[in-house]
Image (cartoon, helix red, strand yellow):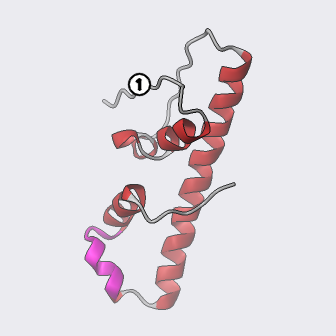
Amino acid sequence: MMVLSEDEYLDKFLETMLGDKERIKTLSPNKLNTLYLYYGAQCIKDETMAESILDIYKSNPNSPIIHFNGDFHSNNFLGTVLKLSRRNPDIKIAVISP
């Protein structure tokens, strides 16, 4: 189940989309709704990637898995990384960002 949390990932998303998180106060209800729909879509992508990675991990627990994604999905161990670690807290994850 996907839950949209008001957390550091949302803060970073809003900062990226708006340039300044405080601009959220100036948005019309329609624009605010659209922004949260975009955030929901971002989270769905993260959940889907995390689920796919975990499925592969379960069928090959002793093999390393390399996953490439846009850096927003994994910077600061947020996004896909956070979703994956919530699904399996024991999984070891390394993030390399150029």
Q: Please name the amino acid that badge 1 sits on.
A: Ala
Up/down of 20 relative to 31, above or below? above
Q: Nearer the viewer, residue 68 or 88?
A: 88
- Is 22 one of the magenta-colored residues? yes
Q: Which corner quadrant holds the N terminus?
A: bottom right
Q: Residue at x 34, y 58 (%)?
A: 12
Is 12 displayed left or right of 6 in the figure? left
Please determine whether, in this image, residue 35 is positioned above or below residue 71.
below
Magenta stretch, residue numbers: 18-25
Q: Is residue 74 above or below residue 10?
A: above
Q: Is residue 28 left or right of residue 53?
A: left
Q: Position of residue 97 (x, y in %)?
A: 34, 31
Q: Residue at x 39, y 60 (%)?
A: 13
Q: Across the whole image, how many numbered discs are drawn on residues? A: 1
- Which residue occupies the foreground of this view, 69 or 11? 11
Q: Quadrant of the C terminus?
A: top left
Image coordinates for residue 59, horizontal then vertical, percent: 74, 18
Residue farthest to the top, as pictured = 62
Q: Is residue 95 magenta?
A: no
Residue 47 lies, in percent from the top left, at: 62, 47
